[in-house]
């Protein structure tokens, strides 16, 4: 209700003023004693001021103190105190706290970061991703990487226009139970429920999503312009962001700076710099002196001082790099774009040639006196790969009700296995065509020693065999069929896909290419009428992963072994079991050997300062543990024991038919 004359007199006595008291509306339960030294401009509505709010560990009364409010609505149980200039054109939700803030203003028609054009992957442009609050890794991928069809691009742009227009508001929003404390200027910034803004220097033209289940934190010294920060993210430590998206449960801080970059769920970004980066889930950079530029990457880990170069001083910064999922760079690695590195590879040293090795996954690419060399498949033998595969699902920190980014976590998947099959074929072809007197072959900008062809091809072959036979045996083990014909029927694929062998990685989601093309066709035709429907389609594809994976297994198995799984005889199944045993034991033994190297004599070098050899060993064991206590080594042993037991069980199972 509008304030009465007696209320005006009471408020005036408490240092309050108004441009026009007739446009000030107070809830019937408002305690006037809790509105002091406040100036009202335009239409202002104030809810109940009952209750207390805890600020910096101190319980303080709700209400409005030392503030100017212009065209605002204030919910119930809100505390607003010590506002430098004004809060203008904001709707403030119940239970919010805004204290010690220089200014909060919103302009009519603002989009709060939606519509911001982020020039990802290619710094010179052409791969723009437009931001909107519900952006997912998959819809961002469509914008950045699927530029081959002008019709698709135009139609999808119209769907995004609708999202941008839907974000347009006449006023800003601070949602329920958000807390904005000790901050500088906020201009055209929407703040989600339960979000915490503390000590922020400057925020302009952005949206901070948040949820009660996973509040978002934006902290000390942060400056951000034209941005979206998703639920559960933590952005602190003087981070500098310009035209940036930060995904759910990501962590950003320690002076990290980024522009024209997007990072999706569970990224960890500290110290370094990113420019024109499309960062799929789990992009990690922790170190100073690291520059990530003009690149697409995911499940990526940057070593300290990593430097990507995209400028040849010719036509400008037009060069770009693709680092397929799981790639790592070592300390002070230098990579010259154009670059395309295969999945789960490790790059060590400085590389001044254009690397193009997408069909050689799980490789080590290292610097040598003669240039860049590659050891294909070597990472298959690394215990680090095992650790990565375990840590990513465990480190999914998202707790918001909706997880927008769809993530495929597995290492051995149709995507990676088909890459291994391609790598094996490459190595076989090189072995067949390379003269025996030629010690080194150049492929994709890197050198491969001829002596590696056979062994590295074997690593790929073991990986392929272990995966395909293992999946078939999984299926046999899971069936409760009482006869071999019934087992064969359980091994039959549903044959939904026309080409189950061709897969791709869409912003962290692995799927058959034909499903992606179907999505694109339905966007272009208008069948999918909104971005939400596109996201729903991707969610349905993610739900069909196991079915699609089995179709892949059946098709690849048929090529590898001459018959589809459902055509296996019992005797042939026993041969498949033997092949699985050989491959699994071979790779597992090498990984186990690699894990034990971490406890060899070289690992003791920096331990036991001023001690005897016996004391040095005790010091090492106290800090690092031992082969007998290390969790990863023990897990590998348990897996070996489980493998032995499983093989025995499968033999017994097959013997029944």
Image: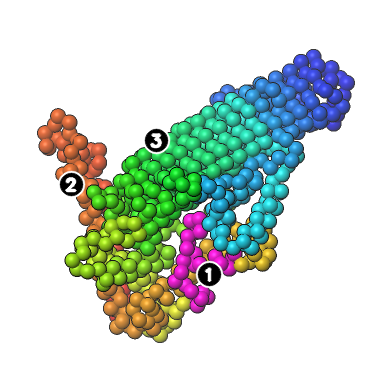
- Residue 434 point in image, percent of width and height: 25, 68
Nearer mark to the viewer, of 2 and 3: 3
470 within the magenta span: no
Tell me the tag on residue 292.
none
Q: CA distance from mark 2 to mark 3?
A: 31 Å
Residue 514: mark: 1
Note whether residue 1 is visible.
yes
* Disc 3: which residue: 288
Q: Quadrant of the N terminus?
A: top right
Q: Is residue 514 magenta?
A: yes
Q: Which residue is mark 2?
A: 600
Question: Could you tell which of marks 2 and 3 lies nearer the N-terminus?
Answer: 3
Mark 3 neighbour density, 10 Å: few (under 14) some (14–19) many (20 or more): some
* Image quarter hosting the C terminus: bottom left
Apparent side of residue 478 relative to residue 211 in the rendered image (left or right) = left
Region of the chain picked out in magenta, as a range: 494-520
Say whether disc 1 or disc 3 marks the residue closer to the N-terminus: 3
| Residue at position x 35%, y 59% in the image | 444
Mark 1–mark 3 Cα distance, whole angstroms, equals: 41 Å
Which residue is pictured at 34% across the width and 48% down the height?
Answer: 352
Task: Give the structural element (helix, strand or loop) at label 3.
Answer: loop
In the rendered view, does 207 fall on the left or right side of 503?
A: right
**Where is residue 313 shown, x and y percent of the image?**
45, 44
Identify the element where label 1 is drawn. helix
**What's the CA distance linking mark 1 and mark 2?**
49 Å
Assign a secondary structure to mark 2.
loop
The quarter of the picture where residue 205 lies is top right
The vertical placement of 570 against 623, above or below, is below
Mark sitting earlier along the chain (1/2): 1
Can you tell which of label 1 and label 2 is closer to the viewer? 1
The answer to whether residue 99 of the structure is visible from this angle is no
The reply to whether the C-beta atoms of the residues labelled 1 and 3 are less than 8 Å apart is no
């Amino acid at each position: 209700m509008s304030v009465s004359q007696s209320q005006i007199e009471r408020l005036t006595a408490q240092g309050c003023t108004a441009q026009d008291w007739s446009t000030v509306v107070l809830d019937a339960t408002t305690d006037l004693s809790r509105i002091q030294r406040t100036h009202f401009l335009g239409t202002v509505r104030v809810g109940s001021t009952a209750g207390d709010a805890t600020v910096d560990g101190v319980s303080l009364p709700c209400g409005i103190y030392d503030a100017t409010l212009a065209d605002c609505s204030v919910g119930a149980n809100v505390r607003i105190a010590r506002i430098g200039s004004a809060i203008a054109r904001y709707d403030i939700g119940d239970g919010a706290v805004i204290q010690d803030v220089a200014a909060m203003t919103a302009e009519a028609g603002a989009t709060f970061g939606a519509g911001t054009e982020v020039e990802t992957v290619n710094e010179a442009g052409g791969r723009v991703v437009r931001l909107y609050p519900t952006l997912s890794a998959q819809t961002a991928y469509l914008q950045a990487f699927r530029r081959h069809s002008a019709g698709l691009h135009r139609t999808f742009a119209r769907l995004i226009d609708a999202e941008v227009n839907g974000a347009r508001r006449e006023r800003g929003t601070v949602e329920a139970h958000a807390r904005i404390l000790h901050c500088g200027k906020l201009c055209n910034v929407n703040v989600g429920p339960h979000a915490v803004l503390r000590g922020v220097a400057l925020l302009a033209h952005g949206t901070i999503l948040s949820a009660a289940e996973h509040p978002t934190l934006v902290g000390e010294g942060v400056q951000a312009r034209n941005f979206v920060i998703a639920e559960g993210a933590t952005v602190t430590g003087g981070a500098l962001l310009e035209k940036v998206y930060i995904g759910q449960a990501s962590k950003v801080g320690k002076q990290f700076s980024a522009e024209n970059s997007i990072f999706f769920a569970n990224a960890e970004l500290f110290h370094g710099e990113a420019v024109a980066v499309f960062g799929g889930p789990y992009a990690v950079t922790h170190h100073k002196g690291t520059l990530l530029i003009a690149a697409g990457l995911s499940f990526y880990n940057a070593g300290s001082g990593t430097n990507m170069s995209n400028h040849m001083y010719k036509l400008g910064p037009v060069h770009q790099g693709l680092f397929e999922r799981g790639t790592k760079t070592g300390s002070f690695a230098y990579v010259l774009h154009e670059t395309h590195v295969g999945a789960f590879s490790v790059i060590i040293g400085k590389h001044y040639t254009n690397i193009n090795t997408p069909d050689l996954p799980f490789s080590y690419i290292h610097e040598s006196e003669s240039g860049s060399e590659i050891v294909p498949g070597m990472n298959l033998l690394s215990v680090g790969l095992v650790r990565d595969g375990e840590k990513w699902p465990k480190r999914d920190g998202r707790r918001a009700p909706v997880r927008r980014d769809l993530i495929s976590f597995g290492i051995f998947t149709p995507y990676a296995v088909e890459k291994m099959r391609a790598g094996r074929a490459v190595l076989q072809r090189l072995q067949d065509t390379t003269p025996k007197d030629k010690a080194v072959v150049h492929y994709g900008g890197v050198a491969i020693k001829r002596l590696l062809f056979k062994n590295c091809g074997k690593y790929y072959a073991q990986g392929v065999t272990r995966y395909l036979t293992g999946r078939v045996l999984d299926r046999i083990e899971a069936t409760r069929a009482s006869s071999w014909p019934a087992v064969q029927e359980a091994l039959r694929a549903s044959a939904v896909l026309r080409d189950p062998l061709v897969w791709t990685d869409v912003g962290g989601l692995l799927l058959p290419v034909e499903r992606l093309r179907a999505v694109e066709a339905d966007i272009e035709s208008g069948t999918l009428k909104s971005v939400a429907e596109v996201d729903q389609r991707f969610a349905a594809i993610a739900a069909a992963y196991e079915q699609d994976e089995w179709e892949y297994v059946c098709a690849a198995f048929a090529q590898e072994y001459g018959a589809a799984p459902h055509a296996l005889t019992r005797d042939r199944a026993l041969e498949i079991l033997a092949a699985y045993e050989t491959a699994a034991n071979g790779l597992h033994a090498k990984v186990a050997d690699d894990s034990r190297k971490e406890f060899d004599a070289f690992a003791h070098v920096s331990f036991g300062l001023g001690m005897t050899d016996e004391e040095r060993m005790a010091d090492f064991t106290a800090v690092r543990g031992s082969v007998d206590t290390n969790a990863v080594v023990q897990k590998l042993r348990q897996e070996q024991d489980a493998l032995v037991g499983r093989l025995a069980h499968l033999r017994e199972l097959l013997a029944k038919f």
